[in-house]
Image: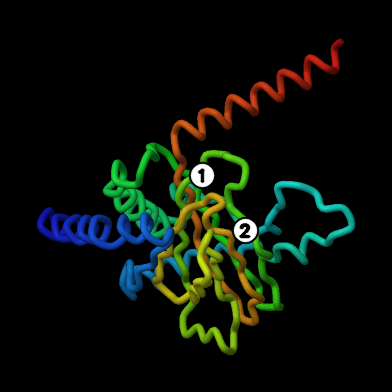
Amino acid sequence: MPFIQHLVDMKLEQLALEQIVPALLDRGYYYVDSFLGDRVGRTVLDQVKQMHCDGLLNDGQLAGRGSGVSKRHIRGDKIAWVSGTERGAEAINFLLKLIDKLISLCIGRLGKNVIRERSKAMVACYPGNGAGYVKHVDNPNGDGRCVTCIYYLNKNWNAMEHGGVLRIFPEGKSYVADIEPLFDRLLLFWSDRRNPHEVQPSFATRYAITVWYFDSEERAEAKRRFKDSIASSQGGTTS
């Protein structure tokens, strides 16, 4: 078992140093196929499908309220937040630990960013009724999110028929990047304004798991701003 783990670690280190870091620094995104392998990937998919079947996925929320605009016109996914320690989420937990390991190997090589924590995993389903997510930026206001990682779980996906492409509009570039949500594909990209992106309408059930890794300094500053705003609002109500 230690020998197998050593081989896994070597593969991850090679992937991180030779592929992911150069790609993020050069064009801002990267994806790798066959990340977990068919057997483990199927197990993750089975656990996500079970969550969906059990009614654990709820409508995705918006950060702000758009007056007169239906939320479903902006994002039509159903989501659940998962730590990986829940019963029935063992394979999801394995996936998260592997992504954690991969990101840890990139730390110190991604410019000034210092990454020490991440979000819970967002398990998401677009139900296949033409739902998508309009063009947006994950972190437009400095909330600390630095790298977005999305793991796709869609067997036999045909983008021509099923849609559901994630289109990235790299800042300052004359091209777009179309990422099909193929089974066992892991996508990584900068979470800030460098990568506006959209999920095009999906016409088949589309599953993905997303985690965000935080830049420590920006995250701490965002928390300070939040605390200051709470203190200010409380002070305003008592004066």
In space, the residues marked 2 and 1 are separated at their CA atoms by: 19 Å
Look at the picture and state if 37 lies above or below 79. Answer: below
Q: Residues within 10 Å of mark 2 (few under 14, many from 20)?
A: many
Residue 93 locus on image (x, y percent)? 40, 53
Counting every numbered tag in the picture gives 2
Residue labelled with disc 2:
79
Q: Is residue 199 left or right of residue 75?
A: left
Residue 102 locus on image (x, y percent)? 30, 53
Residue projecting furthest to the left: 3
Look at the picture and state if 116 lies above or below 59. Answer: above
Residue 23 locus on image (x, y percent)? 35, 61
Look at the picture and state if 193 lies above or below 55. Answer: above
Which residue occupies the foreground of this view, 42 or 144?
144
- Name the image quarter holding the N terminus: bottom left
Mark sitting on residue 221: none
- Name the image quarter holding the C terminus: top right
Mark sitting on residue 145: 1
| Tag 1: amino acid | Arg
Residue 191 locus on image (x, y percent)? 51, 51
